[in-house]
Image (cartoon, rainbow, N blue to C red):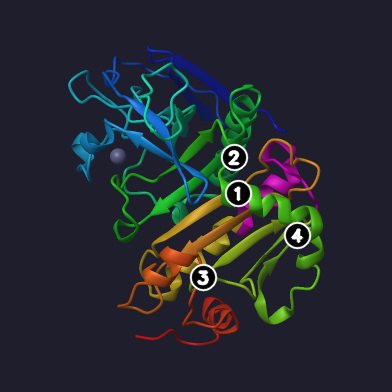
Amino acid sequence: MNKIFIETIDRGDGKKLYLYSQNKPNYKTFSGLPPVEGNQTHLRFHPTRSEWVAYSTSRQNRTFLPNAMECPLCPMDTEEKASDIPVDQYEVAIFTNRFSSLRMEETHVPELEISTQSATGTCDVISYSSNHKDQFSELSQERIELILKAVAHRSKELLNNSHIEYVLPFENKGKEIGVTLEHPHGQIYSFGHIPETIKRQSENQIQNPLLETIAQIPKELILHENTSGISFVPRWARYPFEIWIVPHRRVSQVYDLDDEEIKNLSRLLLESSKMLDKVFNEPMPYTLAWQLAPKGYQDSHHLHWCFQPIKRSKTKLKYLAGVEQITGFYLVDLPPERSARILRGEEQPDE
Ligand SMILES: [Zn+2]
């Protein structure tokens, strides 16, 4: 992988700030925001779903849609305006969320009549830019490449930790999806266990390799393709305008990609996010999942990205209501074939 510059700053309390840049940086540093005291977190076992549920005490006090002056992801120019990224400028930054739902430190786990355990893991924030007004779809391709390299570096470090079983980089975009900070950013959740849905997805890929499914994607669903990967609307889309980006070569982690693949896949990610914003000529609210292999599935899992937008017309959101929430069985109004035509600009979306 082409060299990038990585600077690590100790933020106290075992937390680190990583600064990634393409050009040799020269940071002016400040004290920044102090650690959050007394954050207690633990897991309880859901008896019928057979899954863990996390409980955290500090998350109710999180910063909620601050303006640029109080934004914890904006850089600092004086000691007065405190930030989670206490430097005067940066390109891409990753740091441990002060309001982490998962923690590497020992915390009090209550003894109850059901199974409980410590919420092992960690929650990182990845800031895409020091500019508060930027959006993923407006970043340069070089910046998206740097984001991929930053995630490659950090996810490798996290997966090298014997307490971590699974790493999920993702982005929530838009107020409609519950974003609490406007500053362009994603998150990286690292789990001490493999969530059930993820385990099932990876198990299914052992029998049905994703690469074989991708080989049959028809032209009417393809959005873009280059020498390293393909972007398309899946025939099985559960969300309006859902887009998948899949590398041509099977790799299980971002850090397995070579420079050429990082460049070409960054192009597909950028083109896809631009297509989504163009549908209604305004930023499309979505979640973007980076599907990395959980531990134990690196020989069968195929790395891919999924955009899951929640807007089905200019004025209507796709809510996950009763059936979806209760059963996980999705009801979809917009046929994937039509989504693909709209995304390619061949057909108009609904008002
Ligand atoms: Zn900001």
Q: Please provide percent x and percent y for residue 60.
A: 23, 38
- C-alpha distance separating marks 1 and 2: 7 Å
- C-alpha distance separating marks 1 and 4: 14 Å
Q: Within 10 angstroms of label 4, few (less than 14), some, or many (20 or more) residues?
A: some
Where is 179 relative to 37, above or below? below
Secondary structure beneath dot 2 equals loop
- C-alpha distance separating marks 2 and 3: 22 Å
Residue 90: in magenta span: no
Callout 4 amino acid? Leu
For the C terminus, give its image quadrant: bottom left
Asked if labels 4 and 3 touch by Cβ distance under 8 angstroms, the answer is no
- Earlier in the chain: of badge 1 and badge 3, it is 1
- Earlier in the chain: of badge 2 and badge 3, it is 2
Residue drawn at point x = 27 percent, y = 19 percent:
38
Residue drawn at point x = 55 percent, y = 29 percent:
23
Where is 245 relative to 290, above or below? below
Q: Which mark is residue 330?
A: none
Q: Which label lies toward us, 1 or 4? A: 1
Asked if labels 2 and 1 touch by Cβ distance under 8 angstroms, the answer is yes
Residue drawn at point x = 22 percent, y = 43 percent:
64
Q: Which residue position holds label 1?
A: 198
Callout 3 amino acid? Phe
Q: Which residue position holds label 4?
A: 210
Callout 2 amino acid? Ile
